[in-house]
């Protein structure tokens, strides 16, 4: 498979140019099935309002851009009020670019920002239990499953479990098993 990381992929901070492509990403069938507990967004304005409403003390949102097209999103949301040492991650990659290094590049950027810029001790995320590729990626970067949420999300008549995964950066030192 092509490795787009070595073929012109750029990671940069998210800005107003990205919202139309991000709407397409957040509304992709695969994203809705494996990464979202809600239905599709009706408009770019609705998506922008949803992202802006994420409650946090600080935010760091990046995008992956290839040939002028935004193909991935990664957000790090630093908590506040007694949780300043902790951040929450949201990440997604367009289906046609998955398993080609984009998610790893985005995650590496977020882990770096969490460690160096924000000096976080803990970074966490929630992943659906049947999203094996994502779980494998997160484990590669030192995330461990801390808890299971039974019947976390409903899909039609069925329920899917979710996992809380976290990576600890004690005193800013990288764990030996981290990528």
Image: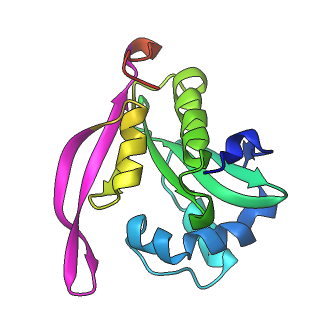
Give left or right: position of 3 versus 26: right
Q: Is residue 106 magenta?
A: no
Where residue 105 sits in the image (x, y, percent)?
61, 39
Which residue occupies 35% across, 48% down? 135
Which residue occupies 47% across, 26% down? 179
Report the span colored magenta: 145-170
Which residue occupies 61% across, 35% down? 109
How many numbered dots are placed on residues in this image? 0
Residue 80 showing in the rendered view:
yes
Residue 16 showing in the rendered view:
no
Which residue occupies 41% across, 76% down? 38
- Residues 10 and 51: in front is 10
* Image quarter of residue 87: top left
Where residue 149 sits in the image (x, y, percent)?
19, 57
Give left or right: position of 103 versus 7: left
As drawn, the residue found furthest toward the left would be 150
Give left or right: position of 121 versus 16: left
Give left or right: position of 16 versus 73: right
- Coloring scheme used: rainbow
Where residue 67 sits in the image (x, y, percent)?
84, 56
Is residue 39 placed above or below 35 in the rendered structure? below
- Residues 104 and 164: in front is 104
Q: Is residue 169 magenta?
A: yes
Is residue 93 placed above or below 76 in the rendered structure? below
């Amino acid at each position: 498979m092509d490795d787009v990381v070595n073929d012109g992929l750029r990671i940069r901070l998210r800005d107003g140019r990205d919202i139309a492509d991000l709407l397409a990403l957040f509304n992709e069938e695969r994203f809705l099935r494996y990464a979202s507990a809600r239905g599709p967004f009706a408009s770019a304005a609705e998506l922008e309002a949803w992202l802006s409403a994420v409650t946090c003390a600080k935010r760091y949102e990046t995008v992956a851009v290839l040939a002028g097209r935004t193909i991935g999103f990664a957000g790090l949301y630093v908590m506040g009020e007694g949780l300043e040492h902790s951040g929450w991650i949201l990440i997604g990659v367009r289906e046609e670019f998955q398993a080609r290094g984009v998610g790893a590049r985005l995650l590496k950027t977020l882990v770096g920002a969490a460690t160096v810029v924000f000096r976080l001790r803990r970074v966490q995320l929630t992943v659906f239990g049947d999203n094996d590729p994502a779980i494998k990626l997160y484990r590669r970067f030192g995330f461990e499953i801390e808890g299971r949420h039974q019947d976390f999300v409903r899909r039609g008549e069925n329920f899917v479990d979710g996992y809380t995964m976290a990576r600890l950066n004690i005193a800013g030192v990288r764990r030996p098993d981290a990528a």
